[in-house]
Amino acid sequence: MKKVLFSDYDGTFYRNELELRQNIEHVNKMRENGNLFVITTGRSFQSFKNVQAKNYAPFDYLILCGGALILDKDLNILKKSLMTSFQITSIINELTKFRAFYQDLTFVTLETRELMYESSQEITKITMNCQDREKAYEISEALQNLLIGINVYVIDIGKGYLVEMVDHRINKSKAISHLIEMKNLNEYEVITVGDSANDLEMIRDFNGYIMDNAVSELKTYSNKVVKDIHHLLTTEDLI
C-alpha cells in the first residue's frame, strides 16, 4: 500500500545545498516505488517558487503558508483558507504597542507578499521578524489573548525569530486532513516530519518524526528522531 510523506521544507528537507540534492534523489526513488511526497511548508507561494527555480524539488502535492494553501503538482489551487478583515485589523492595531520591537510586517496573499494591507486583498497569513526571543513570545501571547480566532507561531530562523499568524482553522495538520479527504488517502499510511513550532500539530496528529535539529518543544510529541530524510525513508521502508 502506498505511503504519503508530508515533509516540512526549511530545516527538514532543505538544510544545506548538498543534503537538498541528496534528498531530491531519495524522494525521486521513493516516488518511483509508488509512494507520494508532499512538501508542507510555511513559505508563501512566491517564496517557494523562488527556491524551486534554483533547486527543483519533486512533489505530488504542495501545502503552503502553514496550511492555508493546498496545491497539486501543477500548482493548481485545490483549497485556500483566508484570514478575515476583522482578524487582520485587530492584529495591526495590537502591534502598534510593539512597533519598536519588530521588523518587516508582511501580509501574505495567494501569490505575493505585501508590506501594506488593503481590504481587497486575500490574506493567507501575516508574518513579522523579531530579533529578541522574549519579545517575540511576548508579542505572540498578546496576539493570542485578543481571542480573535488566530494561531500564532514563533519560529527560530537562526538570525532572529519569525512570528507567524494564521486563522485558527489553519495549520499543517488540518491541511493534511483536508488533502486526505479530497484525494481519498489512507490516514494510517501518512508519515510526517518537521523541525519547527509550526510542525507540531502534524507531528502530534499523524505518524510523526522529528529532525535531530528540531526545537525542544517538539520532542515531547514524538520520540522518533531522525538525522536526515534518508534515515526516515529507510526506517519506513520507502526506498
Image: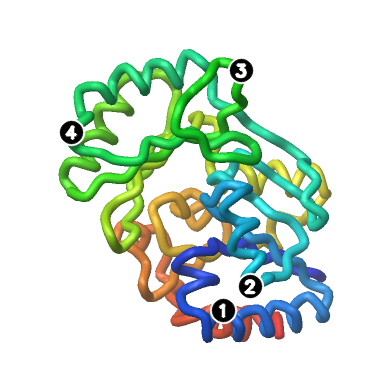
Circle number at residue 100: 4
Q: Disc 1 or 2, which lies upstream in sequence?
A: 1
Does 221 sit left or right of 207 as displayed?
A: left
Q: Disc 3 or 1, which lies upstream in sequence?
A: 1
Label 1: which residue?
A: 20
Residue 38 position (above or below residue 197): below
Does 73 sit left or right of 56 as displayed?
A: right
CA gap, disc 1 to disc 4? 37 Å
Q: Nearer the viewer, mark 1 or mark 4?
A: 4
Label 3: which residue?
A: 120
Residue at point 47%, 54% (across, down): 199
Please state the horizontal and vertical placement of residue 39, each as a whole percent of the image: 63, 60
Does 12 sit left or right of 2 as displayed?
A: left
CA gap, disc 1 to disc 2? 8 Å
Residue at point 69%, 84% (across, down): 25
| Residues at discs 1 and 2 in contact (Cβ within 8 Å) | yes
| Residues at discs 4 and 2 in contact (Cβ within 8 Å) | no
Q: Secondary structure at mark 2?
A: loop
Which residue type does callout 3 highlight? Ser
Please state the horizontal and vertical placement of residue 84, each as a whole percent of the image: 54, 19
CA gap, disc 3 to disc 4? 28 Å
CA gap, disc 4 to disc 2? 36 Å
